[in-house]
Every structure is written in structure tokens, then in C-alpha cells.
Image (spheres, grey):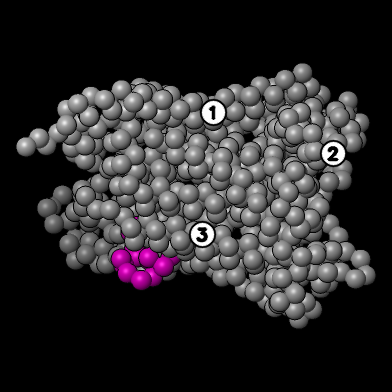
Amino acid sequence: MAKSSVQHGNKTLNVREIIQQKKKSRSVNNYTEKLIPKILFGIAAISVLTTIGIVLTLITETIAFFKDVSFIDFFTGTQLKPLGENAVFGVLPLLTGTIISTLIAMLVAIPVGLMTAIFLSEYASEKTRKALKPLLEILAGIPTIVYGFFAFTFVTPLLRSFIPGLEPTNILSPGIVMGIMIIPMVASLSEDAMSSVPNAMREGALALGATKLEVTWKVVVPAAISGIIASFVLGISRAIGETMIVTIASGSSKNFTFDVTQSMQTMTAYIVEVTGGEAAAGTTLYYSLYAVAMTLFVFTLIMNLLAQYISRRFREEY
Amino acid sequence: MKYVDTEQVHKKMGSRLLANNLAKTLFFLATLFGLVVLIVLIYRVLADGLSWINMDFLMNRLSTDPERAGIWGAITGTFWLMLVVAPVTMILGVGTAIYLEEYAAKGRVSSFIKTNISNLAGVPSVVFGILGLTVFARALDLGSVVLAGGLTMALLVLPVVVVASQEAIRAVPQFLREASYGMGATKWQTIKNVVLPAALPGILTGVILALSRAIGETAPLVVIGIPALLIPVPDGIFDKFTILPVQIYYWTIDSALVAEYANLAAATIVILLIVLFVMNSIAILIRNKFQKRY
């Protein structure tokens, strides 16, 4: 076989033919090379389309809702009676339910989560941290429905033995359980923020004679504060959007109250209740679903953007 | 002149050290709190549910009679759901990741898509349920079937797959790509034959984690309208269905009426947690076994 030829099938090709063949295969390749990025761009665009889809469905149906119910009545109404002849749609009972359950959750998640983060990042040995962190992550991986079951069948009866006036469904127990669910998230994000504070800063403070607590509280936490606050905001967003725990354990009474022993409904639980059957398309009840979902979406979106902004804007660079 | 009042320092030392030790104990107890809750939760679930798990419970269909009720329908439904979610979310997620990492110019479009994905990750799952209900179940007229639920879940867990795949693709060292180009391969050939195989363990880990998230999610499917009624065991993606978490949900709220339903819910939770545990272990196994450091 000559140097300038190659065996192809049972035919020997010379250089010119090889080049021609190469060109032919290259033109097929060229075609794929041009097509593939377009397909991939189309696929990547689907996530954007999803967002647009969410926003569009929410907006169109919400507009339909506000043709039936005035904007002001919706946001200032303290009564929510979506069923029956004289249906009243005030979102305040749902808003207070959501805000109160979120507050309770954060009262649990912020202190415990921050203290856990401090322990893991500042006090624990490498070995302890490696053992404890995966265990905590299990807590974050448990489905919310399991927490709902836990709140309803264990935490509520337990609390009722301390608080006699507690109703079988109330906002306190799901709030606490929701806080427990969020602890790992706050802890792990805050720990990341604190771990990225350079050791030189700790050593400087220690060399001046500060105790470990003083180093943590006066040096590490202030240095990592943007990441820590971002973790709180994300936790709040998580609590606002949490659905199954509150649906199961806080009942469906649309009470406008600040009494945590009472049954209250959150925005998410209302969505589950209304979609769970009776809402026929086109009714005000059906549209109210979208108005509530829109409110929920806007709330969580603001929180998520805020968290991104805080961690970007106030990041300390070392 | 004295800069440090030694006497003062000595006087305060004791209380400062005490505060430090108290704080250390407090922080440790806070860390233990989460773990104690975890233990109590698992103990409660096992105590309530373990004795109810047997072959009949796994293989029986739903029934209003707690003694005869089983979760075969929910197991089959979960299986069919995964059969929709896995390919859809894998194609969408990996495709998006390849585009962002290999093709997209580092500019407005790619950073817009990235911001969009991270915001999508923060949208409450119940809102995805509304999207699924409006678009898949009603506008496309699929109804509350496996396909509608699966597409909704695939979009919900998409950010998990995208982020994991992006990280896996980014971790493939540049010299592998350069070697491939040096051999005369085109860009797509390089991605297909070099980058993706090298990134596969990371991608698979992400997909399994996304699937385990989808298995545990309840709210979107309840919103789409998974019926509480007794439905036949699904045979395909166009059938009505139920899944384990939805079954737990209905049994939990009905346990106020029939006490045994709480046991059924607990037994189903045990099964669900075992499934999740196995999936997460597989993900960790893949990550540890195939993780290459270059």
C-alpha cells in the first residue's frame, strides 16, 4: 500500500479521494455542529418558558379574579368565605396565617440553626463535624409530608398536654415543626458563610486574648453576616411556601386572629383545599386560587431576590 | 503608662471563660436538638407503622378497611411517575447544562437563564402544582394522569439536575477537551465522546437526587387533583394514579376519623423513607466510586 493511499472497504483510495470523503463527512458534521447548539438552546429556553408559563397563568387568571372582586376588598378583607351564596374574598386571614406560621418557624430555625452553625464551624473538631453534618442533612431530606404526620400525630398531642386550650389543629405545632425542618438549611448556609471567614482574623483576635465566644460573636459572625442573613431570608421564603405541614396540622379554619392556639389557614393550604375538588373552572372560587397563588409567588420571589441581593451586595471580600 | 490593667483582666477572666464554656454547651445542645427530633420522629414512625408492614400491605390495593388496605397502587403509581420524570428531567436538565457550560457566550442570555433557574428553584412546589393543573391537566386536557403529574414534577426538580450537571461538566478538565480537538474532533464530538462520559457520575448523582426529591413531593400532585377515591392500579402514563406521599396525606388527615389510618400512614412513611434512603445511598455510592480527581 502506497503512503498516499488508504484501504477503504475493498477499494484503495488515493489522496484526492480521501480528501473528498473527508469533506463529505465534514459537511454532515458541519450540519450537526450547527444544529446541536440550536437544539440545546431550545432545551435551555424551556426553564425560561416555565417561568413565563407560571407568571402568565397566574396573571391572566388573577386579572379575571379582580373583575369579580375589588383589589382593595381582597387585600383589606378580614373575612374569607369562599363557598356559598354570599362568598367573601378577603386574603388577610390567609396572610396572617402564613405570616404567623412563618414567624413561629423562624423563632425556632434562626436561633437553633445559627447556634448549630456556630458549633459546627467554630467549636466542633473536624471529626465531630464530619459525623454530625450528614446526620443533620438527613433532617433536610425528609419529605414534608412526613413532618406533617409528625406534627399532627405527635407534636400537637404533646403540646396539648402542656397547653390545655390548644385546638386539635392549630398554627403553633406546624410552625414549630416547620422551623425544625428549616434548621439544617439555615445551619448549613450560615456555616458555609462562617467557614469562609479567613483564619487570620480568628487568630488575630485570639492573639489579643479574646475567648472563643468573643472571637465568634465579635469577629466571625459580623464578618459572615451577609451570608447568615441571606440564609435567614431563604429560610423565611421556604417557610412561606411550605405546604403539606400546614395543610395537615393547622386545619382549614379561615380565622383572622393572632392567637397561635387557634386553627388558621395559610395561603398554601388554601390552594390545596380549593384544588382538592370542588372549584369548577370559571367560578370566582376558581379564580381566587390564582389570586392567592400570585400573592404567594410574589412574596417568595421577593424573598429569593432579596437573599440573592444581600449575599451579592454585602459580600465581604478577603 | 499602663496600656493593660492586669488586675481588671484577671478579674474578668473567670466570667469570660465561664461564658465561653456555657455558650459552647448551648451551641452543642442546639446541634443535638435537630438530631434528637430526628430520632424521635423515626422512632415514632417505626413504633406506629412497623408492625403493619407485611406482604399483604405491600401487595394489596387500597381499601376503606384498614386491615385489608395496601399500597400496591401507590407503589405502581410512584414507579410510573418516575418513568416520566427521569427521562424528561434528564434531557432538559443535561441539555440546559451543556448549553450553559459549553455553548452559551458568557453574556446576558446565559446569565439570564442562570438567574431564572435559581429563581425557579425557590418557587414553592404548590405553585408548580397550579402550573401543572392549568397547563398539563386542563389546557392540554390530559387530566390528573401520570403524564401530567410527571411533567409537573420534572419541571419542579429541573434546577437540581441543571446545577448538578453544570458542576459535573465544569469539573471536566480543559486538557481532555483540548486533546479531543487536537485529534481533529469537532465540538459536539468532543462533548458527546469526552465531556459527557467524564461528567456522567456527577450527572447521575444529580438525577437520582432529583428523583428522590420528586418521590417525596406531595403538594403539586395534590393540587393537580390526585383523587382520594379508590382508583385502579395504573397500567401506563395515561392512567389516573396515586403515589406514596399522597397516600400518606389522605391517611393522615383521615386518622382523626379512623385511628388505624395513622398506623397505615406510618407504615407507608417507613416504606417511603426506605426508598429514599436506598436512592440517596446509590447517589453517594456513585459519587464516591466514580469521582475522578484530575
Q: Up-down: is B251 above or below B129?
A: above
Left or right for A249, reference B82: right
- Report whether mark 2 lies on the same chain as mark 3: no
* Residue B83 inside the magenta-drawn segment: no
Q: How would you classify the magenta stretch by its main secondary structure?
A: helix
**Which chain letter goes with mark 1?**
B
> For the point 40% across and 43% down, which residue is it?
A190
> For the point 49% across and 52% down, which residue is it?
A234
- Label 2 vs label 3: CA separation? 35 Å
The local secondary structure at tag 2 comes to: helix
Q: Up-down: is B7 above or below B152?
A: above
User: Quarter of the image containing the N terminus of chain B?
Assistant: top left
- Report whether mark 3 lies on the same chain as mark 1: no
Which residue, given by chain and number where applicable, does mark 3 sit on? A303
Q: Which residues are magenta?
A: B101-114
Circle 1 or circle 2, nearest the eye: 1
Left or right for B258, reference B194: right
Circle 1 crowding by C-alpha within 10 Å: few under 14, some 14–19, many from 20: some
The local secondary structure at tag 1 comes to: helix
Which residue, given by chain and number where applicable, does mark 1 sit on? B33
Where residue A276 appears, as percent x and y from the top left, is: 80, 54
Q: What's under tag 2, amino acid-wise? A: Asp
Circle 2 crowding by C-alpha within 10 Å: few under 14, some 14–19, many from 20: some
Circle 2 or circle 3, nearest the eye: 3
Q: What's under tag 1, amino acid-wise? A: Phe
**Which chain letter goes with mark 3?**
A
Q: Earlier in the sequence, mark 1 or mark 2?
A: 1
Which residue, given by chain and number where applicable, does mark 2 sit on? B254
